[in-house]
Amino acid sequence: MAGLVRKFLASASVVAGMSAVFGAPAMAVGFTAIGTDLILREQVGTGFEVTDDLTQLNSILQGDSSNPGGNVELGSSDTGGNPLAGVEADNIQGGTATFTNVTEDIYNTQDWRDTTGKAWFSDAWEQAVEKNSGASPLISAANEEMFYGIFVGQGGLDMITDPNISYINEVGDDVVVGLAGHLNLADRFRFNSFLAAALEGVQMSEIFAYDINGVTGYGWSNSATASGLVDNDGFSFSGNYEVVIEGGGGILSEDVPEPSTILGLMAIGGLAAATKRRSAK
């Protein structure tokens, strides 16, 4: 991937895009809302019910990988502007942490598109080529840039930057974030049959931004388990994605910005921890 290097040593948390099995959190975490552009969905049976009651924030975000429960959508406005929205968690790593959407003024910058946005799409495209290259000669590694342009032109960056968080748990030294998403990414893009065909069977969560005691970055996952839940459209929230933000820093695995881009990323909201571990082949 042009402009990126592998295994850059840094004193930052590692975001691991992976599914993992953990025990119960060591201590309870309390949450407060950031902004007003949130949608709270409570689990009702195998579906969801929207509530405006912010006092339900704590109960909604207390799930885990075995029982994700409801979710909180960050940055849901249809009126434009994509205002900042998120949740603040107390009692995390001895302090506080914030988890937010990625606002339009950030994801529309060329730096963000060329680093974090492209890293996310490269994750997705690697799966697309592996799963669907036999269906069309256009689905190839050589055409990644072309399809990324189509993805951006179809509003893809807007669609992947308003995450739905199901739970945030502290497990030992790690912070585990559950994300509700589509088990099959193609279902999100059925309005464009060309793009949907290329992304058939691909698994990718949306992107969230975090700040844990001053350590900032972006997180997403490229591997899902079936949540056993689904929204009224028959597709949304069918997958549970899990991101583990490892405590103590270390080596940022996989693709991260090379040093020359880091200052620019910090200026637009923090080091983009485009740090995922690929799903086991």
Image (cartoon, helix red, strand yellow):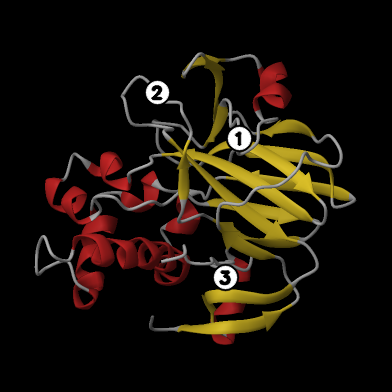
- As helix, strand or loop, the secondary structure at mark 2 comes to loop
Give the CA separation, mark 2 to mark 3.
Answer: 35 Å
Rendering coords of residue 213 (x, y %): 81, 56
Task: Give the mark nearest the N terminus, 2 or 3.
Answer: 2
Name the amino acid type tagged 2: Asp
Q: Residue furthest right?
A: 94
Rendering coords of residue 272 (x, y %): 57, 66
Rendering coords of residue 113 (x, y %): 40, 65
Residue at (35% x, 19% y) in the render: 232
Question: Quadrant location of the N terminus?
Answer: bottom left
**Residue closer to the observer: 205 or 226:** 226
Find disc 3 in the rendering and name its residue: 265
Find disc 2 in the rendering and name its residue: 231
Q: Quadrant of residue 192?
A: top left
- The image's mark for residue 264 is none
Task: Give the mark nearest the N terminus, 1 or 2.
Answer: 1
Give the CA separation, mark 1 to mark 2.
Answer: 18 Å
Circle 1 Cα neighbour tier, 10 Å, few/some/many (<14 / 14–19 / ≥20): few
How many dots with numbers?
3
Circle 2 Cα neighbour tier, 10 Å, few/some/many (<14 / 14–19 / ≥20): some
Name the amino acid type tagged 3: Leu
Give the CA separation, mark 3 to mark 1.
Answer: 35 Å
Name the amino acid type tagged 1: Ser
Do the CB atoms of the residues marked 3 and 1 lie less than 8 Å apart? Answer: no
Question: Quadrant location of the C terminus?
Answer: bottom left
- As helix, strand or loop, the secondary structure at mark 3 comes to helix
Find disc 1 in the rendering and name its residue: 66
Question: Is residue 194 positioned above or below 3 on the image?
Answer: above
Residue at (76% x, 75% y) in the render: 11
Q: Is residue 262 visible?
A: yes
Rendering coords of residue 35 (x, y %): 63, 33
* Mark whose residue sits in front, 2 or 3: 2
